Image: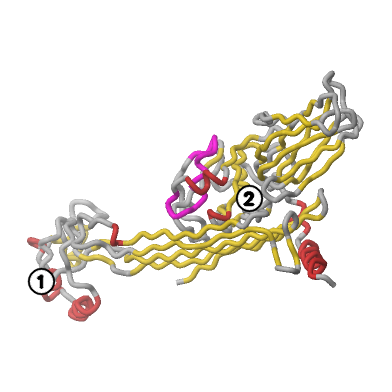
Amino acid sequence: MSIGRILKVALFVILLTATSNSALAQVSTAAVNGVVQDPAGASIPNAAVTLSNVATGVEHRSTTNEVGAYAFLNVPPGDYTLSATAKGFKTLKLAQFTLVVNQTARFDLNLEVGEVQSSVTVEAAGAAIQTATAELGAAVNETSVKALPLNGRNFSQLLWLAPGAAPISTGQAKGGGYINPVGTFVQPSINGQLNRSNMYLLDGIINVESFMGTYAVAPIIDAIQEFKVQSHNDQPEFGQILGGTVNVVTKAGTNDLHGALWEYIRNDAFDARNTFLAKVNPFKQHMFGVQAGGPVTLPKIYSGKNRTFFSLGYEGFRYRSPAATLFRVPTAANLTGDLSDEARQLYNPYTTREDPNKPGAYIRDPFSGNQSPASLLNSAMVAYAKQTLPTPIVTGVTNRNAMDPTSTVQAQNAYTARVDHNIGQNNFFWFRISGSLQYK
């Protein structure tokens, strides 16, 4: 058996092993429809319509029905050209246009009478207004995802760009009970709904951490092609939610090999000293990774150009910094019973008695000058405090004379791998595995 047939069989097995729910829930694609007409506005049946992916060279073909209508369903988002031809008419070609996730674009094509060999190119596609469905949403493309500044490269910060998204701060702003997010995490309210009412999809697959309603796996920024925040849906494939739908699409490979390599460094060498600390607080943070995609090619064995593509990504995150939390410890004078540096009046607990002037209330004798007699001190506890508590330091903050040096450590490895394969002109399937591993 040839290597080409082996690869096809292997990919087919992967397709069969996918769960039925995942296969039925594909909402990470786009669609194109419209009608083909002659100069008088009459429908042209049996016209050949071709939708071509600019990056992969994959062509999707359709034929108009008796009323001149055509449709392309489950089209991967990307840049496309569209052409139509019919006997007795010139070939019409639309210039390059972009399809975004969950978009249904309508292009009505008007053919001119003439020879098929002649062609007319229309530069302006004009499909900015979506009239095929009533869903509302805003797509964030690859350029915005990669170019806009993000604290920690967390894509959720871009959710604020969607109309109707309101930044709110709740107990879930840390990413959920089981998620330890990298960078600034955002969980917005969409159109006034609870921020735990949103749905996260990754390539059409549910990606929700169910306990807190956040995402389960954060996609790598450089592996995102685009995403869409849908604030209103009228389509049956979307459900289970009151808020918005965050629909993320990962990159697929193309006919050209593309890649990226990055490292972002933040550490104390670039930081100024905190006003209340004697020196710069130690701080180390590194984000590094690689992403690459292209055709699956085995020299002299198999060429995946226009057919089979791969996309791989890895990102590492390393963080270490002391807590630097200020607190209060007893001074040498405090350990002898001298508590005169305490602003509040202290009382002798052993003198507690009922207040004769207020039945049911109790009073105590104050320590004069907040000085506790040495006889009231527990020598064992004083020795324990001397052995375990740190020596007081000057912090510059009132009533704070110690700092917690315990290090906060976070390390994470995120990965993603995707393979796309086209079967003929109207069918394709893909496989992706993504995840992250956190450790200390």
Residue 206 in view, yes or no: no
On screen, residue 352 versus residue 303, left or right, reads left
Residue 353, by quadrant, is: bottom left
Mark 1 / mark 2, whichever is N-terminal: 2
Residue 93, by quadrant, is: top right
Question: Disc 2 designates what residue?
Answer: 249
Residue 77, by quadrant, is: top right
343, above or below 384, in the image: above
Mark 1 or mark 2, whichever is nearer to me? 2
Report crowding for label 1: few under 14, some 14 to 19, many 20 or more residues within 10 A (C-alpha).
few
The residue sitting at the left extreme is 369
325, above or below 189, in the image: below
Region of the chain picked out in magenta, as a range: 150-166
Q: In x, y percent, where is residue 55?
A: 67, 48
Label number found at residue 373: 1
Under tag 1, what secondary structure? Answer: loop
Q: Is residue 153 magenta?
A: yes
Check disc 2 and give the amino acid type: Val
Q: In x, y percent, where is residue 264?
A: 42, 58
